[in-house]
Amino acid sequence: MVLTLLTIAPELQIRIFSDLDAVSLTRCSSTCKSVYETIRGSSLLMYIIQLYLDGLRDSGTSASSGLSYADRLKQLLRRRQAWGSTKPRLYATFASLPRCTAYDIIGGVFAGTDGKKLQIVSMPTNSKEQRTIIERTLSGRPVYDLTLDPTQDLIVILEGDNSPASLSKPRRLRIHIRSISAFDHHPLASVSPLELIVCPDGVHGNTPANAYLFIADNLLTLFLDTESSTGDSRHRVIMWDWNTSDLLLVREIYAYKSIHMIYVNEKDSSLSPDPVLASMSSNNMGVIDSTSFFVTSPVNSGSIRLYKFLRPFGGESPLSATHLATLKLPPVNPPSAVFRIVNDSGPIEANVPAHKSFLTNNEDRIHVFRLGYQHPQRMFPLPMNMFVTQRIFAKYISLGLGRSPGRPPLNIPWKEWGPANARLILPMCIISPPYSKSQYIHGQRVAFSATGAHWEKNRTITNSVAILDFSIAAVASARRTLPSALSPARRPGKLLPQSTIKASQISLFKGDIESYLPCVCSIWDFSGKFTAFQAIHTDGVITVDAVHPSIDENGAVNLGAYVV
């Protein structure tokens, strides 16, 4: 077969090879020198390989289709090298509204509000230095959260009322679904605003301590948290198809006898929560894509439970969120226990932005789980961070779908799924305060404050940001495991060793916990630029825009957009 292929003209060889995926191309390149040189000499084939190494796919927009494959390859390699840079360049600065209560940045658009005004800023990029600032007037009611998807011209705002906190009186919440451009009722939303009534139970009040909105295509998710005077939290998750306003899921995160949420809109004034989901003990959730999600549970050492909606939105049959698999976390020694599993991951854009040449491959996204353990020998909870590749979720969702109907969900112990697909480590000060949500995660890269961390011997890092890069490109470069012609450009960064948590050191787990999802760490130095970080956001797939807020005496967030 190889000899027959080698008799064909090189142009035809490239056309044949272009139908292969990156893994197959890399394997073919090792068969003989002639094939290796053909692949090495083709910008198209190298582009396919390098996209895979970075966990990306071609956007197919005018931003990429107007370029030759050679130019696309150069752009991709420049982008990769920029992420490994240690000296990001300040691109623009601006002040947010004073006492900004909620803000978000997705797709190069920043939105922030103080409840009275909404500020929308189109951030500068490598190709667009000018920024635009638009201000809109709001009702003056409290805004608990907002989120956006510029690819759908969509902004969603969670608004409360002005009633006082109460253990007996309900609170009305509104979710406004509007266009960014006109700031009017979004044309694809059948109902706006959606309305909720939070009914207290005599222990937990009617005021959200935390409220987060998430968008994945037409899936809108609200995570709502109310607290008692003792600090005990009560969480709820509500999911809609925001196009049709159909209620997809309502669930109580802790196992209460009833769900104290009332859903009100023009179509339906009642709800029937899923009895299986409503009875489970849990304390967070995450969106995988517009048809799949997971919930986390602290019961029995902790677990991640994978679900999938099994009918398309807008269908005639009742919606069913089917439990397909449970991924167990490392077993702990009683009386130690898991009390918190909080998840973050990057935003999911519905459409392809016109200005982007590359998009993150959804299966290659990284999820960050912030774990909290109760330990009898510790006065305070022991925090840990766990990084997980989304590929493992996709794998077990697929396996669960392949099982016969009626069979119980897959039950996967940590030792089968965790060590190779996750990295469990002790605290690294990942920043995720209120309103920062998930924007410090960008595809396969995670940004967090490195201040106080000891990444190098006898050196404490200050005023710096660490970038953890889980891409094959970064790891292969650090290991130098690819053939030189296929290997990405050399970049600064440290390949982190296997993570091992010894049972003898922390008598928490039943045995040593090893995890080795490959990862490279780079440090961005911001010494002298900001005195404090409140949150870190990363955004953009062509450009590398990092927004680092600091707080001034008036409560405004001073934002610096950096590009490297």
Image (cartoon, grey):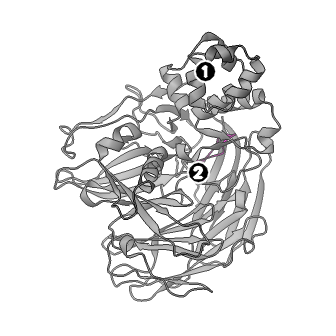
Q: Quadrant of residue 176?
A: bottom right
Using the numbered discs, state the Cα–Cα distance from disc 2 to disc 1 in whole angstroms: 38 Å
> What crowding class fits label 2: few (fewer than 14 Cα within 10 Å), some (14-19), or many (20 or more)?
many
The residue that disc 2 covers is 549
Q: Which residue lies furthest to the right in this view?
A: 66
Task: Note whether 222 is above or below 10 in the view shown.
Answer: below
Identify the residue shown where x is 64% and y is 16%. 35
Task: Note whether 266 is above or below 364 in the view shown.
Answer: below
Judge by depth and name the residue closer to the eye, 236 or 143. Answer: 236
Q: In which quarter of the image is the N terminus?
A: top right
Identify the residue shown where x is 63% and y is 29%. 50
Identify the residue shown where x is 41% and y is 40%. 421
- Mark 2 vs mark 1, foreground winner is 1
Q: Do the residues labelled 2 and 1 touch (CB within 8 Å)?
A: no
**Left or right of residue 70, residue 269 in this image:** left
**Left or right of residue 528, residue 259 in this image:** left
Percent across and percent down for residue 192 are 66, 78
Judge by depth and name the residue closer to the eye, 436 or 476. Answer: 476
Q: In which quarter of the image is residue 414?
A: top left
Percent across and percent down for residue 550 are 57, 51
**Left or right of residue 544, residue 272 in this image:** left
Q: Can residue 556 be seen in this view?
A: no
Q: Is residue 491 magenta?
A: no
What label sits on residue 523 in the rendered view?
none
Question: Which span of residues is magenta-colored?
Answer: 538-547
> What crowding class fits label 1: few (fewer than 14 Cα within 10 Å), some (14-19), or many (20 or more)?
some
The residue that disc 1 covers is 486
> What amino acid is at disc 2?
Pro
Judge by depth and name the residue closer to the eye, 120 or 560. Answer: 120
Q: Say what secondary structure mark 2 lies in.
A: strand
> What amino acid is at disc 1?
Leu
